[in-house]
Amino acid sequence: MRPSTIPRSTLDTPRLRLRPTSPADAQRAFEIQTDWDVTRMLSHASFPPSLAAIRSWFSIHEKEWAEGTAYRFAIENDGHMIGIVDVDEISGSEGSLGYWLEKSSWGRGFAFEAAERLIRFVSEDIGLSRLTSGRADDNPASGHVLTKLGFINTGSKETFSNARGGNLLQQRYALVLKR
């Protein structure tokens, strides 16, 4: 773990604003995760979602940033929070990319746009040199996003899904970052 000296600031793209998450985002995240089609793709989320658990998770985001272990951003389109993009599990110069969006924002290129901007941030400003990511085997759209970002499929593994209440096959990906 290395303490972060990077200030919590927003990142902009042509259509989106990525802003560091705050505890106030928990309610909107809860609303998004009440959609089974969203939550079933997340390995750590439960279904139905627990507002208390989501609030607890959001309450530690600022501390994670300060410790340099995770950088989590709310994705906003036209001032409305549509999802989350983050890099967490940071150890040394590596981290894990994740993202999720409300269903009405799927298929519009928002996941790619947000992830591409976050990748630039963690490469240029944080100094990470490698990212990993994963997606449920039955979520090929996320695989398309990762491939378009330059990630390479490194194989599959079984992982437990809280939402599904059992194991799921997850495709794993890696990206070497250029600085």
Image (tube, grey):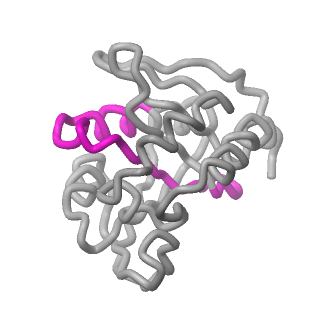
Locate residue 50 relative to residue 147 in the image: left or right.
right
Locate residue 64 relative to residue 24 in the image: left or right.
right
Q: Position of residue 26 (x, y in %)?
A: 59, 37
Magenta extent: 89-117
Residue found 41% across the figure and 43% down from its top: 32
Q: Position of residue 109 (x, y in %)?
A: 21, 36
Locate residue 120: give its quadrant: top left
Question: Is residue 130 depicted above or below 73 in this figure?
Answer: below
Locate residue 28 relative to residue 149 in the image: left or right.
right
**130 is within the stretch colored magenta:** no
Residue found 42% across the figure and 37% down from its top: 83
Q: Position of residue 158 (x, y in %)?
A: 43, 85
Question: Is residue 49 depicted above or below 75 in this figure?
Answer: below
Locate residue 2 relative to residue 153 in the image: left or right.
right
Observer-nearest residue: 165 or 150? 165
Residue found 29% across the figure and 18% down from its top: 15
